[in-house]
Amino acid sequence: MPSFDPVRAFRKLAYNNALANRRLLQACAALKPGEFEAQRTSFFPSIKETLNHIITVDWFYVDGMEGGTLGLKAFEIDEPFDDVVSLAQAQAKVDQRLVALCEALTPERLISTVNLHRGDRIQEERLEDVLAHLFQHQTHHRGQVHAMLAGTSVAPPQLDEFIVADDARFRGREVAELGWNEEKLMR
């Protein structure tokens, strides 16, 4: 019987995050002109604004977990990307940073303190709590984009086939394109 690995769930969530973002952004790349920035009903009033929010928050938290001091500079430009292609490229980069961070985790690192630079103060949090918060944030806003896609010319993609082994048949091509394999995802 394998032993319990407290970092395994975070690795799997990082893989899930990268795969779901990839699939969602590929769907968004197929939108007709004007649909990406069109006004919609959601917390952020467009697909463009929501996806830009996701990436700036990722920059903030991933930098902090890596020990950086980017802080609120991550949010200096509300919408750093005007098109899906450049946004998807930047999202893939930050997703790979998050995967690398989670692949290098140890139980000791999970309980270490992360310093998040909030301008006039340093917020101190346990790494495992920051990771949980970031993955929840991603899922929350991806769901909003998914719902907004239902009102476009593009069907919302399946986003929850990346955690359990039985779903391997649905993700094989994407896993291979990322240079991963099922053994890596399931360890």
Image: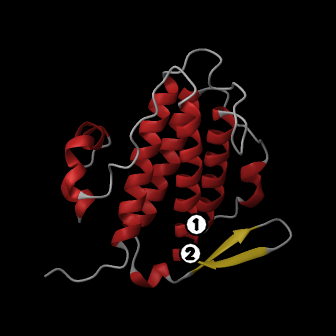
Q: Which residue is rendered at x = 41% and y = 44% of the image? A: 159
Rendering coords of residue 79 (x, y %): 73, 37
Q: Which residue is rendered at x = 22% and y = 83% of the image? A: 3
Q: Amino acid at mark 2?
A: Asp
Q: Secondary structure at mark 1?
A: helix
Rendering coords of residue 183 (x, y %): 19, 58
- The image quadrant that residue 174 belongs to is top left
Applied colour scheme: secondary structure
User: Where residue 178 is drawn, which disc sits there?
Assistant: none
Disc 2 + disc 1, Cβ < 8 Å: yes
| 137 versus 132 height, above or below | above
User: Where residue 129 is drawn, which disc sits there?
Assistant: 2
In this view, the residue in front, 35 or 147, is 147
Q: Amino acid at mark 1?
A: His
Task: Name the residue that disc number 1 marks.
Answer: 133
Q: Secondary structure at mark 2?
A: helix
Left or right: 169 as drawn, with respect to 58:
left
